[in-house]
């Protein structure tokens, strides 16, 4: 997912200066059948702790947060949603994959 870039005007001598911030349009969420989600296990930069990572979601942040909340509650563990990825604490690849496929998402396991 593309990160939002902020443009900050520090100082302007023009009293009529009005900076036009580019509004980033909300991305439309693809239907579950058209999503191409990837589920993998990640241990990098996490002090050896394993997390299940779901990425390649195409859609709005609200829909991604809702999907992340559903996965966390069904797995009974914590996690987070940031940078367009869902992190589920622990190795729950098979359960997450089954939950996504039951919800009609096109998802597949990536890596070992």
Image (cartoon, rainbow, N blue to C red):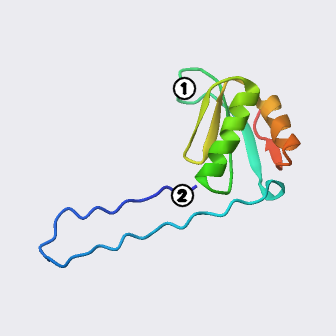
Residue under label 1: 46
Q: CA distance from mark 2 to mark 1?
A: 23 Å
Q: Nearer the viewer, residue 43 or 104?
A: 104
Q: Earlier in the sequence, mark 2 or mark 1?
A: 2
Residue 90 pos. (x, y %): 68, 23
Regarding residue 1, the answer to whether it shows in the image is yes
Residue lying at 61% horizontally and 50% vertically, measured from the top left: 62
Check the image and report above or below for 27 versus 100. below
Q: Nearer the viewer, residue 50 or 73?
A: 73
Query: What residue is pinned by disc 2?
Result: 2
Camera-nearest residue between 64 and 88: 64
Q: Which mark is in front, 2 or 1?
A: 2
- Within 10 Å of disc 1 (Cα), the crowding (few <14, some 14-19, many 20+) is few
Q: Quadrant of residue 30?
A: bottom right
Where's residue 8, x and y in %? 28, 61
Residue 67 figure quarter: top right
The x and y percentages for residue 103 are: 84, 44
Q: Secondary structure at mark 2?
A: loop
Give the residue displayed 37% in from the left and 69% down from the top.
21
Q: Residue 87 vs residue 15: left or right? A: right
Say above or below: 53 vs 22: above
Question: Is residue 54 in sight in this rendering?
Answer: no
Callout 1: helix, strand or loop?
loop
């Amino acid at each position: 997912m593309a990160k939002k870039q902020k443009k900050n005007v520090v100082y302007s001598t023009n009293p009529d200066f009005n900076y036009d911030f580019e509004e980033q349009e909300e991305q439309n969420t693809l239907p579950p059948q058209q999503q191409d989600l990837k589920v993998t296990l990640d241990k990098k930069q996490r002090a050896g702790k394993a997390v299940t990572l779901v990425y390649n979601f195409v859609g709005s942040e609200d829909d991604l947060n809702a999907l992340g909340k559903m996965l966390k509650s069904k797995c009974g563990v914590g996690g987070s949603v940031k940078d367009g990825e869902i992190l589920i604490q622990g190795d729950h690849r098979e359960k997450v994959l089954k939950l996504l496929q039951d919800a009609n998402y096109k998802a597949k396991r990536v890596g070992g």
